[in-house]
Image: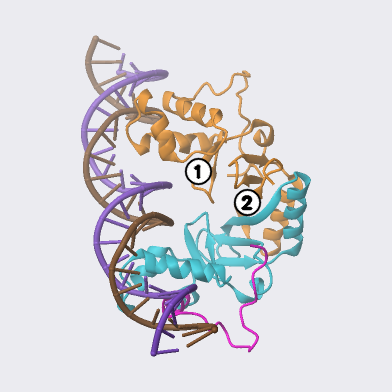
Chain colours: A orange, B cyan, C brown, D purple
Amino acid sequence: MGPHLPHANSNGEPHPALKKNQKLVRDVLVASSAPLSAYSILDLLRDEGFRAPLQVYRALDKLMELGLVHKLESLNAFVACSHEACEVNEPAAFMICEVCESVRELGDIQLADHLGKLAANHNFALKHTTVELHGRCKNCA
Amino acid sequence: MGPHLPHANSNGEPHPALKKNQKLVRDVLVASSAPLSAYSILDLLRDEGFRAPLQVYRALDKLMELGLVHKLESLNAFVACSHEACEVNEPAAFMICEVCESVRELGDIQLADHLGKLAANHNFALKHTTVELHGRCKNCA
DNA sequence: AAATGATATGTAATAACATAACATTTTTGG
DNA sequence: CCAAAAATGTTATGTTATTACATATCATTT
């Protein structure tokens, strides 16, 4: 894959291609302070006509492809991309607070470099990295 | 948690405390070249009397507590600890080949340091890190 | 307007991963 | 030995994710 594209098209308009379900899913993620599971999203969108998990998973797949949403593998949950960290590059890491469930998306170029070199040292063709830090955030420590 | 204990006790004997199920589960993981899901382990141990997922999950929990087994969050699968990388410290990272499914456990002290500093910079009390690199190994590239 | 092709959506069923609750047995240490 | 703690067995259930197939929507061409 490599770094994904920026979040706006050449007209400056944000994501004109987002379909109805994709927009609904994105909106609940943006509105949420914590990561959401696919089934939580499903429940939140019952009133909008969602009936089955696949409606959520398909929207999530597309949003992840666009870099608008990320999956937290250690939680089996999803977060909206925090624009500032992810506009240009794949996010380097997520800091996840075990108390308040807040998630901070980090774009650390040195970390990305380090992981790239680590892979290169082992002749490993790196495609994707998962870096998730668990602990307590500043407010909850 | 912090760094886990070495894998042998003060007598030099390896893991005298391992119970029957724990030993069975550990043995199938050690024998496997690829990570195994809990249900794969269950299937492999049917002949040994395993009947239910909990028998596997309980053994895995204990083995993880002892640092003998690690979970790969991005695969929902488990691997035996590769002794050399993990004897003293928490493993820093896993390199996972998407072709041959081989997993390499890395103990990179610089990476651990970098993640520690990253957390400290954000006043984040770090408890546990998940670092999983996906791509193609040397042989499969 | 009708036909086509590509993409998106709806729905049911099932697969895959994980835990709760409770009874029983085994192990450990005084 | 005996009581406490740990481990085990078993059933049921909860949670996360995908397969398979039907239908709808939209842009393009005929």
Considering the numbered disc 2 on the image, is that residue within a helix, a strand or a loop?
Answer: strand
- The Cα–Cα distance between marks 1 and 2, rounded to whole angstroms, is 14 Å
Which span is picked out in magenta? B1-26
Q: Residue B54 has which mark? A: none
Camera-side residue of D9 and A82: D9
Residue at 65% across, 74% down: B87
Disc number lying in front (1 or 2)? 2
For label 1, the SS is: strand
Q: Chain of mark 1?
A: A
x%, y% of residue B57?
43, 65
Residue kind at label 1, given as amino acid type: Ala
Q: Position of residue A32 (x, y in %)?
A: 54, 31
| Residue B141 can be seen in this image | no
Residue bearing mark 1: A77
Residue bearing the label numbered 2 = A134
Magenta span includes B25: yes
The numbered mark, 1 or 2, whose residue comes first in the sequence reads: 1
The number of numbered discs placed on residues in the rendered structure image is: 2
Q: Nearer the viewer, residue B5 or B73?
A: B5
In the displayed structure, B49 sits above or below B127; it is below
On screen, A46 above or below A133? above
